[in-house]
Image: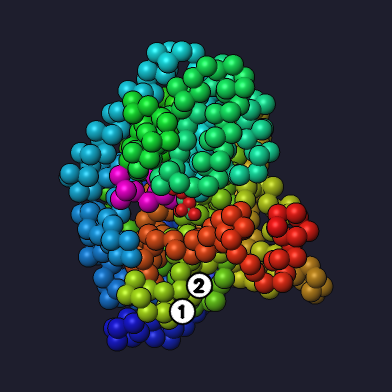
Amino acid sequence: MTDSTSQAWAALKALDKPTLAQLFAAGDRLAAYSARLDLPGGTIRFDWSKTHLDAAHVAAFQKLAEVTGFSAKRAAMFDGEHINVTEDRAVEHTAQRGVGNEASVEEAQALHLRMKALVEAIHQGVLGEVKHLIHIGIGGSALGPALAIDALTRDGAIVDVHVVSNIDGLALEAAFRSCDPATTMIAVASKTFTTTETMTNALSALDWLKTNGVADPYGRVVALTAYPDKAVEWGVDETRVLPFSESVGGRYSLWSSIGFPIALAVGWDEFAEFLGGAAAMDRHFRDTDGMANVPLRAAFADLYYTHLRSCQTRAVFAYDERLRLLPSYLQQLEMESNGKSVKADGKPVDGPTAPITWGGVGTDAQHAVFQLLHQGTNLVPVDFIAAIQPGDDLSPDHHRNLLANCFAQGAALMAGKESKDMARAYPGNRPSATMLCDEINPATLGALIAFHEHRTFANGVMLEINSFDQFGVELGKEIAKSIVAGTASFDPSTEALLAEAGIK
Ligand code: F6P
């Protein structure tokens, strides 16, 4: 930590911490701590007034952003500099949406044209009748497509997509039961084209096609990868290999050819709107300075709670069934990006990094985990995400109640309630932020995801870490491989488990 960074943290830690009631009593919080972004798919409102950020903290976090080089690092990302220092790579998911280094944007657009041509050929029946796609991938090669398809196909999909990630054969068997082999294509989605789960599932899917009468199973496969040569070597015809750049991180890859199943399910025009919504958020993030920058301001609140209030988790509740997979998507985005103990310069971090992201869907979560949020001993900053327009065609009672519950939770967490009976008392002064969209559509979904990507990046810059590597996932994979190969011995506990399970 440089002197100026440690001074910025010391200044933050020395500030008074007024309660939410005191902050609201002090003046018009809503004007200062909310924002509206008018985006291609409609407006998204951000309300941080129920967080503990005040003018002094915002100014001190702005100082932290300044001394950690936020503006220069943001410019470096959009310019395609190698900000992923440990892997010596650029970080170019925004180029997939048309915002970034010119050459990278051009390359991404050319690759998108290839993908569009294949998607449209399939829709037109050029590859025979295709009713189903089994999309096989894991982590970033599955979570984004699963979220977007689940959110955007509530009225039906052009092609029925099943996303399979788990190596547990039950997952693939479930997809087989829902698909007719004669009209099913397989997408093998893997940035590296080496991931054990994906390659094992892909081979089993080929077997399933073959044993069910498909004469040329490889002819039904599309490969989505940053290593096209490996896909060709594995047996996929070059015309059905959709490459993307190595500079697109796995957890940021749904905008690249990893988004092929999204485009196949919703159509190319909607996929283009999805990219367009994200691009609008990119431009906001790139071109807006200071407190008006929405992802940066959200990161200030994140750091306030982890560093100044010792919060170890943050929760996200989607008050919209279409966003039910958003919490698990954000878990990978935030925890794989910022769950680090080493700074970008190789030195140990000076404080906490990413909190544990968790969450669920409202109103279900209210009847399960909200007890802890209201009365437990952990302080948990909560994000609520909702849309004004309903996605359903049922009685308006459903959506009125959904939104009423969403807003009621934020109000209750903040206000609390006194009671002589301690078991029935609510302490209040518990923080939440609300994101309220006009509606959920491809563009607003794209913008919401891009907002979280940039928020994660802004956190990483102020934490001085590299948000774009993930070495922490490797050790467990290596050990699993050596177990399967039978080449290593382990501690007595692990050995006993292996023996009990008949693996060794
Ligand atoms: O193991 C973690 C990880 O590398 C993620 O970062 C990535 O999204 C996932 O595995 C899948 O990797 P691939 O797309 O290369 O199969």
Q: Is residue 423 visible?
A: yes
Left or right of 224 in this view: 286? left
Q: Which residues are magenta?
A: 245-257
Q: Which residue is mark 1?
A: 351
Q: Position of residue 42 (x, y in %)?
A: 39, 38
Q: Is residue 279 visible?
A: no
Contact? badges 1 and 2 (CB < 8 Å): yes
Q: Is residue 360 above or below residue 3?
A: above
Q: Cβ(mark 2) to ligand 1 < 8 Å? A: no
Q: Position of residue 25 (x, y in %)?
A: 51, 71
Q: Position of residue 395 (x, y in %)?
A: 66, 29
**Foreground: 173 or 495?**
495
Tell me the residue at 39%/24% (across/down).
119
* Amino acid at dot 2: Thr
**Foreground: 418 or 228?**
228
The 10 Å Cα crowd at callout 2, few under 14, some 14 to 19, many 20 or more, is: many
Q: Is 246 inside the magenta-drawn segment? A: yes
Kind of element beneath mark 1: loop
Q: Is residue 453 above or below residue 422?
A: above
Q: Which mark is residue 122?
A: none
Left or right of 27 in this view: 155? right
Q: Residue furthest left?
A: 102
* Amino acid at dot 1: Gly
| Mark 1 and mark 2: Cα distance apart in space | 9 Å
Q: Is 350 inside the magenta-drawn segment? A: no
Q: Position of residue 89 (x, y in %)?
A: 28, 57
Q: Which mark is residue 306?
A: 2
Q: Is residue 389 above or below residue 359?
A: above
